[in-house]
Image (cartoon, rainbow, N blue to C red):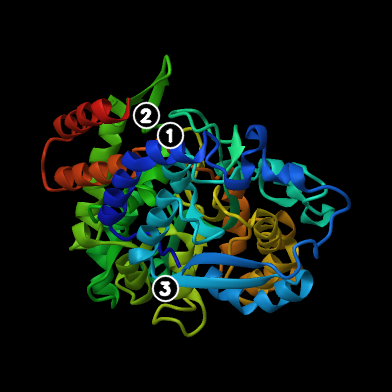
Amino acid sequence: MDMHAHDRRRFLAIGAAAAASATPLLTACGAGFGGDNSKGGGSAADDVTGSFDWKRAKGRTVKALLNKHPYTDALIADLKAFTEKTGIKVEYDVFPEDNYFDKLTVDLSSGRASYDVFMLGAYMVWQYGPPGWLEDLGPWMRNSSATGAEWDQADFFPNLLSADQWSLKAGAPLGQGGQYALPWGWETNVVAYNTEVFRKLGLKPAETFDELREVAGAITRRAPGAGFDGMYGVAVRGSRSWATIHPGFMTMYARNGLKDFTVESGKVKPAMNSPEAIAFTRDWAEMVKKGGPPSWTSYTWYQCSSDLGAKKAGMLFDADTAAYFQAVKGASPASGKIAFHPGPKGPDGSLATNMWIWSLGMSARSRNKSAAWLFLQWATGKEHLRKGAIEYNHIDPVRKSVSQDPAYKDRMRAIPGFIETFETVVDRTEIQFTPQEQFFDATTSWAAALQEIYGGKNASSVLNSLAGDLASKVG
């Protein structure tokens, strides 16, 4: 599920310490910080020549660090196929997310390279990329001796591949520069709703933000009288965490044409205090007051997802996975009565949607890069990802061929509106944030500001204060 919503305070603290130590580490290891990348600043991929061969690293061992997740379950279950194909053994450690990123950050910053490959979110590229901890996978992808034609880069949804590509310059757009990770599984942020309460109350899914606010308020007022005791309108996140900003809030924010930061003369400047952003944020807080969960300031993905499944929330505006695992047959009291919808459009019809991507990356200091690349190639390849989508829970395919596979479509048709919603938003879903190293700190502060506005403080003064604080940190 959407297992990235925990408080990142420990991650941020360790990341800050790691950043402080990055310069001496880089000095000690050479400017490229690249282990066997050191030849003239080139890539270890250049050493791979001849015909492509899955067996070229036979007998080697790849060490992987993995987060506890359904994608991980699918990977581990299929590792035998990789070893049979390549002769490479995979050793792995799996940690729950409350300490997974601590473990990864410490390992990368120390330069120990205990792990060759690992899971990371695309946002983490902004933290791990600038110090030189991540291998640029672009040279591997471009080398036909290292990458088989069957991998078929063009089969990835291009917006997903671009999300892990960056020039490492704050404010620079994604889709340029090095490819620091590969998309593996992702989540789009849409609306899921209880079809039973919508039918009884004569409601339709909202097509505009104003309609969403009205529907949320109507459910809160009227659902108890229709036999849905204690139901409120819409579940959205509210805890003091970066993860409160990135799903429903940032999606609706972007659909309204709003930006978190602007870039002027190479300087990143906060924009969440523009008049339009202030008005939107005030309206969002008001929607939560009138139609959201009573204990909103403690809400993470888990409470939001659980409330939809328990028939406590009439709608969920969050990761599609958070709703999917409540919607499948027998999973919750609401299963069989949950449908999907792309969510409200912006004033100009925009369906810009923010996303989360679980990606796979390689340590720049790995001493086993050739074998590690074969592993990444296999794990993001058509065969494994098709199996993950059909037999396991890779429900949002990163590959076009998997999304169109008849077996995948047959499976997902059991969830009303899922395929239609996916196909409506997939090409409009991308990271809506401005890439910069202070992302986690900035968005956590933004969530705190949102809580203050929800609590009754003046939206303009709160957001102007936030922007002023961030200007000194991010610019």
Q: In this rendering, is residue 28 above or below 239?
A: above
Q: Nearer the viewer, residue 110 or 381?
A: 110
User: From where the camera sits, is residue 192 visible?
Assistant: yes
Report the Cα–Cα distance between label 3 and label 2: 40 Å
Residue 161: x, y in percent? 62, 45
Q: Where is residue 167 in the image (x, y as percent from the top left)?
A: 54, 31
| Residue wearing tag 2 | 261
Q: Which of marks 3 and 2 is in front?
A: 2
Residue receiving disc 3: 196
Point out residue 228 in the picture as x, y percentages from the top left corner: 29, 75
Furthest toward the front, the residue is 28
Please, what is the three-letter code of the amino acid marked with disc 1?
A: Thr
Quadrant containing the N terminus in the rendered view: bottom left
Residue drawn 11% across and 44% down?
A: 456
The answer for how far apart the CA atoms under marks 1 and 3 are is 39 Å
Of tags 1 and 3, which is closer to the observer?
Answer: 1
Disc 1 crowd rating (10 Å Cα; few below 14, some 14-19, many 20+) is: some
Spatial CA span between label 2 and label 1: 6 Å
Q: Are marks 3 and 2 in contact (CB under 8 Å)?
A: no
Three-letter code for the amino acid on which mark 2 is drawn: Phe
Q: Which image quarter: residue 450?
A: top left
> Relative to residue 76, is residue 310 drawn left or right?
left
Instruction: Name the residue located 29 percent from the left edge and 46 percent from the top edge.
Output: 17
Is residue 314 in sight in this rendering?
no
Which of marks 3 and 1 precedes in the sequence?
A: 3
Q: Which residue position holds label 1?
A: 434
Contact (Cβ within 8 Å) of mark 1 with mark 3:
no
